[in-house]
């Protein structure tokens, strides 16, 4: 039988205590806080400062209203900062396909006219205490008929893209991504 000294046990105990413990996963919460409605054919909508788009509904043609849902993002109870850019992605609505740049989200949309009118998007980058928040697992929804649908982000997701083809009877899809942060 091998004799173990107190000193050897003390060294072993210190080694166990100094093993790095993995950081716990950040608690992420995407919380709905605001909705706004605009006329589709003459509407510009942007989420209020600090919020991102998490849903949209539209019923009717271009003369009907569109409602947008906005949420803020909390990580470990701290609100994420949203840094927005300019409007871009100018495209004809009836053949539009837009995805926000890597690790950005949609914070606004504007559209003028009918399906031949132009659509643009405003995106934002997310930061928490100077560190960028990532958007992962981007996936597209199934196709909805534009003239009668409602869509909403899933758990801890935000809107990152939209595509539409045709007029108000055409199909619309949304891209959602998951908010991710390595704490």
Image (cartoon, helix red, strand yellow):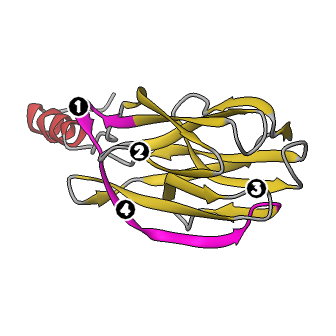
Q: Which mark is residue 3?
A: 1
Circle 2 SS class? loop
- Is there any visible trace of residue 25 in the rendered image? no
Q: Which mark is residue 18?
A: none
Between marks 4 and 1, how big is the CA–CA gap? Answer: 67 Å
The residue identified by callout 4 is 84
The first of marks 3 and 2 along the sequence is: 2
The first of marks 2 and 1 along the sequence is: 1
Q: Position of residue 18 (x, y in %)?
A: 20, 43
Q: Are marks 4 and 2 in contact (CB under 8 Å)?
A: no
The residue identified by callout 3 is 114
- Residue 69 placement, left or right of 97: left
Q: Residue at x 81, y 36 (%)?
A: 147
- For residue 89, above or below residue 80: below
Circle 3 SS class? loop
The first of marks 1 and 3 along the sequence is: 1
Tell us which disc is closer to us: 4 or 3: 3
Image quarter of the N terminus: top left
Q: Which residues are magenta?
A: 72-94
Crowding near the residue tagged with mark 3, few <14, some 14–19, many ≥20 C-alpha atoms within 10 Å:
some
Q: Position of residue 38 (x, y in %)?
A: 54, 40
The first of marks 4 and 3 along the sequence is: 4
Q: Residue at x 42, y 34 (%)?
A: 71
- For residue 147, above or below residue 91: above
Q: Residue at x 12, y 35 (%)?
A: 10
- Residue 54 placement, left or right of 59: left
Between marks 3 and 2, how big is the CA–CA gap? Answer: 23 Å
Crowding near the residue tagged with mark 4, few <14, some 14–19, many ≥20 C-alpha atoms within 10 Å:
some
Picture quadrant where residue 85 is located: bottom left
Circle 4 SS class? strand
The residue identified by callout 2 is 47
Q: Position of residue 100 (x, y in %)?
A: 58, 62
């Amino acid at each position: 039988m091998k004799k173990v000294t107190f000193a050897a046990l003390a060294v072993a105990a210190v080694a166990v205590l100094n093993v790095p413990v993995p950081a716990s996963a950040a608690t992420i919460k995407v919380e709905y806080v605001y909705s706004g409605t605009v006329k589709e054919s003459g509407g510009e909508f942007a989420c209020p400062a600090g919020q991102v788009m998490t849903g949209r509904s539209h019923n009717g043609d271009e003369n009907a209203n569109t409602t947008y849902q906005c949420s803020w993002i909390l990580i470990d109870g701290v609100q994420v900062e949203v840094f927005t850019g300019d409007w871009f992605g100018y495209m004809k609505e009836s053949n539009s396909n837009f995805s926000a740049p890597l690790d950005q989200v949609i914070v606004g949309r504007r559209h003028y006219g009918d399906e031949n009118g132009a659509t643009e998007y405003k995106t934002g980058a997310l930061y928490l205490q100077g560190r960028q928040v990532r958007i992962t697992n981007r996936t597209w929804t199934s196709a909805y008929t534009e003239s009668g649908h409602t869509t909403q982000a899933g758990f801890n997701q935000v809107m990152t893209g939209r595509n539409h083809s045709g007029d108000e009877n055409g199909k619309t899809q949304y891209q959602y991504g998951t908010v991710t942060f390595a704490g």
